[in-house]
Image (cartoon, helix red, strand yellow):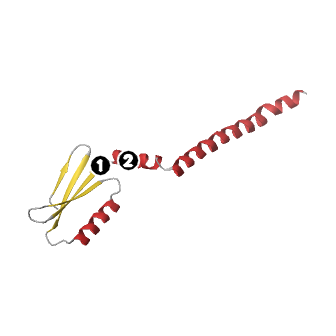
Amino acid sequence: MIGVNKTHDSTLVRISLGHESNGASTLAVLTATRVAYPFSTVTLVESGIDGSSLLNVLLHTAREEYRQASEYVASKPAARFVLLFSKFLFAMSLLSFSCLFYSAAISPSLARQG
């Protein structure tokens, strides 16, 4: 690891992969890092001077990762359908509760009057 730079909203981690890393192992490390940190920014920089590889991982705050995850899920049609369906079920449950409350609390008093 070369260094860690922290700011108020993110952390940059720089990792040296060394001179002896080949293309396949470098690509495997890059892919594994992207899988491990899906909402972080992962880049690979190769030095043209000495041929070394440097992996940069920009880790965001939990709030920023939550925002990115929410945007990602909101862009999926299946997630929008589930959200719409859950709102529909909520409205139907309120309607059912209102009907049951009316029949249990108000209707018996009307039946006794008649």
| Disc 1, SS | strand
Image height check: is 81 above or below 98? below
Q: Quadrant of the N terminus?
A: bottom left
Left/right placement of residue 52 relative to residue 24 reads: left
Q: Does label 2 or label 1 sit earlier along the sequence?
A: 1
- Residue type, mark 2 in image: Gln
Observer-nearest of 26 and 11 = 26
| Disc 2, SS | helix
Quadrant housing residue 24: bottom left
- Foreground mark, 2 or 1, reads 2
Number of numbered discs present? 2
Quadrant housing residue 98: top right
Left/right placement of residue 13 relative to residue 95 reads: left
Label 2 sits on residue: 68
- Residue type, mark 1 in image: His
Observer-nearest of 85 and 53 = 53
Mark 1 residue crowding within 10 angstroms, few (<14) / some (14–19) / many (20+): many
Label 1 sits on residue: 60
- In percent of width and height, residue 53 lies at 17, 64
Residue found at the far right of this picture: 114
- In percent of width and height, residue 15 lies at 19, 61
Residue found at the far top of this picture: 113
Q: Give me the residue at 24% from left, 43% from top.
A: 8
Left/right placement of residue 104 relative to residue 4 reads: right
Image height check: is 19 above or below 40? below
Marks 2 and 1: CB-CB under 8 Å? Answer: yes
Q: Give me the residue at 54% from left, 51% from top.
A: 78
